[in-house]
């Protein structure tokens, strides 16, 4: 707001120059203009009104700024490498922040996943954070990383199942279109939503971590589909073996009868 005094001075200067120009023009050209002499008392009222107007603006701006300063503020730090992901929540505001929960929003904000079952052991909520305090909200490694990935992809799997789309089809093998739809989900972005006592803070979730979470989950789903296909093949081989044994026994029985 260092520019505010300059704006006020500029407006006052413009009004003053306009008044002087009007007064000079009327007095120097009395024939072609209407005779009118500027009332400087009225000019003072105008200047006073403009000053009051800007004073109100400055006051409102200061009130708004004070409210912003008194609002809890949070920041996040994210670290991702291979199958390890850590998310740290830091209080950066002047006043304490009370964190009640966190969720992941994705699929164009149509899906919200509560992270209550994936939080680290040290991040028991609700949690009060003073200025400078930090808490490790998520600390995922190997199994816990895969579990979150499975939770993220679960709504997409349920939707495919509801439409009768399966990962593998008996007699045909792996359904590639099924996995094409899952891979399309991995290209989207996610947001971390932290619920506090005052409002909900939104942060951009690491795109690399989100894609890795979905990739591992999709790979697990692909392995399950492969195992299902191998199981079907094994059942088919067993059935063929049983039929072959039955055929051989029938041939022996016929030979003996003859």
Image: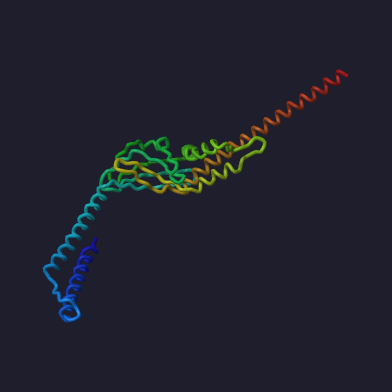
Q: Is 96 positioned to the left or the right of 253 in the image?
A: left
Query: Which of these two is toward me, 149 or 19?
Result: 19
**Quadrant location of residue 60?**
bottom left
- Identity of the residue furthest to the left in this view: 41
- Identity of the residue furthest to the top in this view: 257
Q: Is 128 positioned to the left or the right of 107 in the image?
A: left
Query: Which of these two is toward me, 158 or 201?
Result: 158
The colouring scheme, among rainbow, by chain, secondary structure or one colour, is rainbow
Where in the figure is residue 175, as x and y percent of width and height?
61, 40
- Identity of the residue furthest to the right in this view: 258
**Quadrant location of residue 225?**
top right
Q: Is 1 positioned to the left or the right of 148 in the image?
A: left
Relative to 78, residue 25 above or below: below
In the rendered image, the quadrant that contains the N terminus is bottom left
**Quadrant location of residue 16?**
bottom left
Identify the residue at horizontal 32%, vertical 40% (top origin): 99
Where in the figure is residue 40, as x and y percent of width and height?
12, 70
Relative to 229, residue 258 above or below: above
Identify the residue at horizontal 75%, vertical 27% (top origin): 243
Where in the figure is residue 214, as x and y percent of width and height?
50, 43
In the rendered image, the quadrant that contains the C terminus is top right
Where in the figure is residue 32, as x and y percent of width and height?
20, 80
Query: Which of these two is toward me, 107 or 216?
Result: 107
């Amino acid at each position: 707001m260092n520019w505010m005094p300059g704006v006020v001075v500029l407006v006052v200067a413009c009004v003053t120059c306009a008044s002087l120009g009007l007064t000079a023009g009327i007095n120097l050209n009395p024939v072609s203009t209407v005779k009118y002499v500027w009332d400087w008392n009225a000019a003072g009222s105008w200047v006073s009104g403009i000053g009051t107007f800007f004073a109100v603006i400055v006051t409102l701006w200061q009130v708004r700024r004070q409210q912003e300063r008194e609002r809890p503020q949070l920041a996040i730090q994210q670290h991702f490498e291979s199958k390890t992901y850590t998310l740290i929540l830091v209080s950066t505001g002047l006043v304490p922040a009370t964190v009640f929960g966190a969720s992941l929003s994705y699929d164009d904000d149509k899906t919200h996943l509560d992270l209550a079952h994936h939080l680290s052991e040290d991040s028991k909520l609700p949690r009060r954070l003073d200025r400078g305090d930090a808490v490790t909200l998520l600390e995922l490694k190997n199994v816990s990383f895969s579990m979150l990935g499975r939770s993220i992809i679960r709504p997409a799997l349920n939707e495919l199942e509801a439409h009768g789309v399966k990962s593998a089809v008996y007699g045909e093998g792996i359904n590639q279109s099924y996995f094409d739809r899952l891979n399309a989900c991995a290209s989207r972005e996610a947001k971390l939503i932290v619920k506090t006592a005052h409002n909900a803070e939104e942060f951009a979730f690491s795109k690399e971590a989100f894609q890795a979470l979905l990739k591992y989950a999709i790979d697990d789903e692909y392995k399950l589909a492969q195992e299902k296909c191998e199981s079907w093949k094994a059942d088919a081989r067993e059935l063929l073996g049983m039929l072959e044994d039955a055929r051989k026994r029938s041939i022996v029985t016929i030979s003996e009868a003859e």
